[in-house]
Image (cartoon, helix red, strand yellow):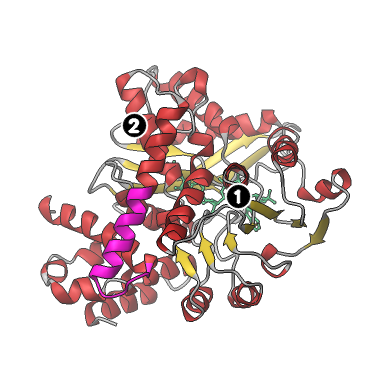
Amino acid sequence: MNKYVARVMEDLKAKQPWEKEFLQAAEEVLSSLSAVLDRDSKYEKNKILERMVVPERIIMFQVPWVDDKGQIQVNQGYRVQFNSAIGPYKGGLRFHPSVNLGILKFLGFEQVFKNALTTLPMGGGKGGSNFDPKGKSDNEVRSFCNAFMRELYRHIGPSTDVPAGDIGVGGREIGYLFGQYKRIVNSYDSVLTGKALNWGGSLIRPEATGYGNVYFAQEMLAVKGESIEGKTALVSGSGNVAQYTVEKLNQLGAKAITMSDSNGTVLDMDGITPEKLEWVKNLKNVKRGRMAEYVKKFKKAKYFEGARPWALAKADMALPSATQNEIELKDAKALVKGGIKLVSEGANMPSTPEAIEVYFANNITYAPGKASNAGGVATSGLEMSQNAMRLSWTSEEVDEKLHGIMKSIHKTAYETAAEYGTPGNYMNGANIAGFKKVADSMIDQGF
Ligand code: NDP
Ligand code: 2IT
């Protein structure tokens, strides 16, 4: 490891040893940069790494709200404004009981490099709360969102910071958050993405992360002279990203045989067909039910309580689309045993460093989330463009732009990996390309 990288990492670990997800994300990116830092001393001279690992600003606030029993509840709210070198802060909000500052710093850090790869002018940020929308009524979710925005509104703006969804934040939450912003500020600003079509949203934004990940997998397969048609996939999660991953796999003649949630995994060897997927969408998005119910409806499928998809069946590729560190060492070994040849990450940092080592050691083609799941935020960027022009593009236009962006991210990561001596290593390629764009912009802009 380059000495400059080692020094910055050591310092970071000493300062915040408890932020383990953030340290993991930082170590992965910084470890990719040795060749860049060896070639050019300007980054060290300008203390770029030291600056890149510290958010430009962190906002932490209390969120008091009233539940259906009339009791006051208090949650913790956050917005991490990580880096604005190439555009306004941009990135999702996560509502999940596991949310803490270390998790949001990892997500904000990843977002900086991901957004740089999209070709669009967006800096990186992330926010959220330890609020758990699961089991809450619409009334409680609205009460919470109103309270959250009552503080957040003063820190965001169309040219300052534009949040969107992530785990636990979908169309319903974005609606409540946008309504509250507008009531307070009295201005119809493009201040959130993932809006509904009637009030400023973009076609294809809900689909974009899952579709984009499958487009990315197609590009990786094309390099190997293969097609996605006929391939079998293990997909985790059953939320936004997982649903549209399965949808695009079906459209392209591939087959998803698993979907999951935090309670367990469904294995359907006949494939989660478009009809079954529609049923899952209704279950998850409307009824807010659990995947365990799938086997009551589709009797040939099996449900594995408490299990992840990775060891349940043989398949050609894995598309993790639930959460961070959902593929650990034992899971990666199971993927190898099950014949997996490609892993394309829909979730953010779903593979642990030990799992990634297993991929490389076993010639598995591996796409890191910051490249392969960038279609979501890229289409958020397209939503901002449409809002700025006060018009909307057709779904064909947006999908074509998304597809073009995914191809461009693939090309950049592939070519950069080769240029810096690690051909085929999309992780290095994505980290280096994202880093150079942001770092060079930081140097241009002084301090
Ligand atoms: P959703 O809330 O729509 O769905 C999340 C899914 O993952 C649910 O099935 C959920 O199960 C499961 N899940 C969440 N946490 C855990 C956990 N700790 N263990 C096991 N399963 C879990 O979120 P998204 O689909 O939007 O996000 C999924 C992943 O994709 C996240 O990593 C997110 O950061 C990433 N991502 C999302 C983008 C977007 O545009 N939405 C863009 C790029 C990346 P359960 O219902 O039981 O909680
Ligand atoms: O992780 C991500 O890229 C997202 N959750 C989407 C962010 C966005 O601003 O659309």
In the image, residue 286 lies in the stretch drawn in magenta = no
Quadrant position of the C terminus in the picture: bottom left
Frontmost residue, 123 versus 160: 123
Q: Is residue 190 left or right of residue 260?
A: left
Q: Is mark 1 within 8 Å of ligand 1?
A: yes
Report the number of numbered marks: 2
Mark 1 secondary-structure assignment: loop
Q: Is residue 268 left or right of residue 419?
A: right
Placement of 311 over or under 122, stated as above or below: below
In the image, residue 412 lies in the stretch drawn in magenta = yes
What amino acid does circle 2 point to?
Gly
Q: Which residue is mark 1?
A: 96
What amino acid does circle 1 point to?
His
Q: Residue 344: percent from the left, percent from the top? A: 50, 59
Frontmost residue, 329 versus 207: 207
Mark 2 secondary-structure assignment: loop
Which residue does the image show at 57% across and 32% down from the upper left? 171
Residue contact at pointers 2 and 1, CB within 8 angstroms: no
Q: Residue 342: percent from the left, percent from the top? A: 52, 65
Q: Which mark is residue 302?
A: none
Q: Residue 172: percent from the left, percent from the top? A: 60, 30
Q: Quadrant of residue 185?
A: top left
Of callouts 2 and 1, the N-terminal one: 1
Placement of 192 over or under 404, stated as above or below: above
Q: Quadrant of residue 170?
A: top right
Placement of 2 over or under 50, stated as above or below: below
Which residue does the image show at 22% across and 60% down from the upper left? 436
Q: Which residue is mark 2?
A: 157
Q: Quadrant of residue 326?
A: bottom right
- Visible in this render: residue 104? no
